[in-house]
Image (cartoon, coloured by chain):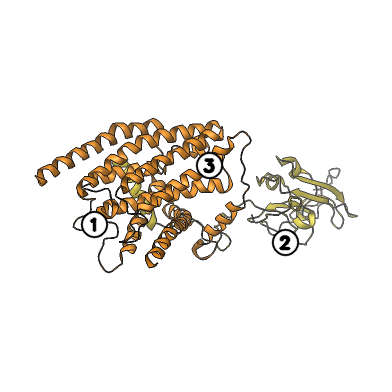
Amino acid sequence: MNVTLKTALIILGVPFAMLSLAAGLIWVERRLLALWQDRYGPNRVGPFGLLQVLADMIKIFFKEDWIPPFADRKVFVIAPAIVMSTILLSFAIIPFAPGIIISDMNIGILFFLAMSSLGAYSIVLAGWSSNNKYALLGALRGSAQMMTYEVFMGLSLMGVVMMTGSFKLTDIVLAQQHIWFVVPQFLGFVIFLIAGIAETHRLPFDIPEAESELVAGYHSEYSGMKFGMFFVAEYLGIILVSALITALFFGGWLGPGFLPGPVWFFLKTFVFIMFFILLRASLPRPRYDQLMGYGWKILLPLSLINLLVTGAIMMIYIN
Amino acid sequence: MISYLRSIWIAFSHMFKKRETYEYPEKKAPLPARWRGRIILTRDPDMGERCVGCYLCAVACPVDCISLQATEDEHGRRYPEFFRINFSRCIFCGYCEEACPTYAIQLTPDYEMSEYNRQNLVYEKEDLLIDGQGKYHGYNYYKVAGLAIGGKNKGEAENEDKPIDIRSLIP
């Protein structure tokens, strides 16, 4: 009973915590962007503007949830649900602390890669069903970008997997007790970071959305809570990638003993979330072909080299 | 690559810089002394209306937001019967102030004139007329103009000589 209760609590608690964190991130992002642009950001509603999130939520829930008459209704409705569910499912493999993990499966990383690939369907279907040229262009770009970055996102993680000998995330975290994987796998970390930004299509790689070019890209036609789902999914994606970077390269919950494990995990994750926001505050969006060029011509060979060198060194040391 | 890192660093370093924002309702931005804001009609030092209803402001106004009707009192002194400025049209260019020959119409450094109802932006004469002289103190048009008006004849204005009798030979 006790174990069942604990599992149930974790299963309910993790998505709830992540969703509320994602909503809170809207406020965090706006305040941080403002800080880096010498502004204040939302600071009127409640203490430090914290209730801004609540106000935004109330607003978006009461907005008209409009489905354009020219849209493909069923697909249009299901597209935002796909991205939400795939991202929330991905959180199942995140080890927040020893024991606080929904499903510690032995194909953890593969599960995450599979889920993030499925998330691409959401963009493609949303763009297609909107029956709008900007949305379609956004979806086209989104699918190409996801496909490109998916490839070396997986490859960049293989170094970590090789050094651990397991796809299981708890094993990977525990393998970092002596040294965080960011040191031996620095190249892999940088590539995974870039791929993670592209995967969540955050700025500077927000090419599928590209406000200045494509209205809002694949979710141009969405309104109300359906738009809200895309929005929250984007923030969930940030948390997911930051949490993964923490777990894979920065020792997850491991840290000096004066703070408990989950706190370390949260702190490290938050640093990466802030870094994502800092990137948004500082870097301009590359052109579409430049993005593809970086992906195929630079990052893919680099991740392959990383893989080869890691493999060679391991072979020398283990033999 | 270096330039990317550099721009990330520059954005990050702005964390420790002073913010540009004025938190408006509590703290207002300093206005330049010649800020062109809400338009007023001023009075001369004797509390008479300066406006003489010459229509020059209405003519100068590029958006035609000023409308007025001149009339005369029993002494022959001109004043506007009504004076109406539609601030929903006004662009605060200040041409009316430049055109005014009697310093009557002036722009003030006040910009807080939002309304919920557009009609409330049409200011009538009683809204525009203030009980003061505005920017130009001590100026009274009828005291310096060589115009005969009730209580003041030709040559009785300030710094004005008596009219010369051109038919007389006496200096």
The three-letter code of the residue at mark 1 reads Leu
Residue B113 location, quadrant:
bottom right
Q: What residue did someone put label 1 on?
A: A174
Letter of the yellow chain:
B
Query: Label 2 marks which chain's residue?
Result: B
Question: What colour denotes chain A?
Answer: orange
Query: Label 1 marks which chain's residue?
Result: A
Q: Looking at the picture, how far across and down is residue B144, in whole percent?
A: 75, 53
Q: Do labels 3 and 2 share a chain?
A: no
Q: In the rendered image, is residue A287 in sight?
A: no
Q: In the rendered image, is residue A110 in sight?
A: yes
Query: Label 3 marks which chain's residue?
Result: A
Residue in the foreground of this view, choosing between A319 and B82: A319
Q: What residue did someone put label 2 on?
A: B132
Residue B31 location, quadrant:
bottom right
Question: Which label lies toward us, 3 or 2?
Answer: 3
Question: Which label lies toward us, 2 or 1?
Answer: 1
The furthest residue to the front: A1
Q: What's the CA distance linking mark 2 and mark 1?
A: 81 Å
The three-letter code of the residue at mark 3 reads Ile
Q: What residue did someone put label 3 on?
A: A78
Q: Looking at the picture, how far across and down is residue A264, in whole percent?
A: 31, 62
Left or right of B147? Residue A159 is: left
Residue in the foreground of this view, choosing between A34 and B25: A34
Q: Looking at the picture, how far across and down is residue A219, in whole percent?
A: 52, 40
How crowded pointer 2 is (Cα within 10 Å; few <14, some 14-19, many 20+) is rated as some
